Amino acid sequence: MKAGLANEVVQQLGADRVISPAGALPQPAERLDASGPTRPFELEVDVERLCLDSTSFRNIRERSLGDPERMAARILEVVAERGKMHNPETDSGGIALGTVTEVGDRYTDPPAPGQSIVTLASLTLTPLRLTEVTRLDPDNPQVEVRGTAYVADRSAWGPVPEDLPLETVLAVYDVYGAGSITHELVSAGSQTVVVLGAGHAGKVALAAARDAGAATVIAVDVDPEAVERVERLGLCDLAVATDLRDPIGAAAALKEAGAPPADLTVVVVNATGCEPAAILLTKPTGTVLFFSMATSFGTAALTGDGMASGARMLIGNGYTPDVGAYSLDLVRRTPALQEALAA
């Protein structure tokens, strides 16, 4: 009985597809088996598009010098070597869009075959094989491909709504947790919220903070055009362009701009080395939500220790129980956010 139960849980988690190391779960595993056929606790998905996470896409673009063919080759190389889109240099992946082609006979509450879905669990744990990258724009993390993925029973997925542009849907699903968790952490009318990073996740977090009633919402990014855009669209009260890898300089820039210390700092940058700035900009009694895959949690913990900060530090889980419903609804209700995400 125990052996049978354990085997069932292993299959629900997709751990039966782990090739190495033995006993690992799919996310930290070095390699997965992405071959057919579909197993009892799985969906088979005909993959049409990958939406790579910002940190991984930036890494691939930089190491390929922005060349589309080299970037495509790198994506194919990673997937062929690992059986999943799990960038070994950033430990991150993204999500995928595709059509359900087969449903295992023991899958819980599955979508119907033929339904278009987005795989919300990270590509770092999703068995995937690719035959071709059909279109890649070096400035767009949404990469068109031909391939097959297997979604385990315990891995979240979301339907594709018809009332929003497809690119917007994918952009939101990729970062929906940033919206849901930010909204949950903000106390209406009483908080200063600082969002570090003005990419898709930053835009959703800014809108969520305002939606939750934050008294002051501040956007910070190294790109002056990015922060100017979110300020012009009304997603924040104050926008500051500064390099967050220079914590002293960043703190000085925010002070000069009149920004108060943050009650909540949301970190959604795609660059490394921004942990000290995040903690320095936050009240010692505040909260830092690290939602960036570029975060070094060791650096964050030791930096907080070194400056005697009592700020609560949270890891931003990409999954929340609403599986994107809040962030998608936020986009529907916020024309400025729709415009920002389309830029």
Image (cartoon, rainbow, N blue to C red):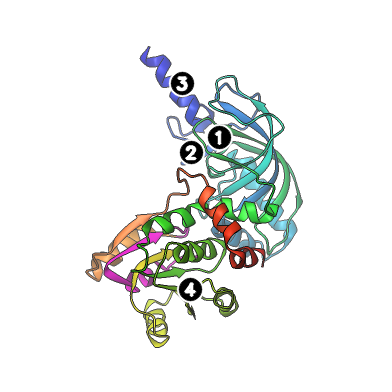
Residue 108 in the image, given as x and y percentages of width and height: 53, 26
Q: Is residue 278 magenta?
A: yes
* Proximity of marks 3 and 1: CB atoms separated by less than 8 Å: no
> What amino acid is labelled 2 in the image?
Ala
User: Which residue is disc 3 drawn over?
Assistant: 8
Which mark's residue is nearer the viewer, 3 or 1? Answer: 3
Residue at image location 53% in from the left, 48% down from the top: 325
Mark 2 nearby-residue class (10 Å; few <14, some 14–19, many ≥20): many
Mark positioned earlier in the residue sequence (4 or 2): 2
Q: Quarter-wise, where is residue 138 in the image?
A: bottom right
Residue 85 in the image, given as x and y percentages of width and height: 59, 45
- Mark number, residue 219: 4
Measure the C-alpha gap from mark 4 to mark 2.
Answer: 36 Å
Q: Compare residues 264 and 39 and report the one nearer the observer.
A: 264
Q: Is residue 195 visible?
A: yes
Measure the C-alpha gap from mark 3 to mark 4.
Answer: 46 Å
User: Which residue is disc 2 drawn over?
Assistant: 29
Residue at image location 52% in from the left, 76% down from the top: 222
Q: Quarter-wise, where is residue 57 in the image?
A: bottom right
Mark 1 nearby-residue class (10 Å; few <14, some 14–19, many ≥20): many
Query: The residue tagged with tag 1: helix, strand or loop?
Result: strand
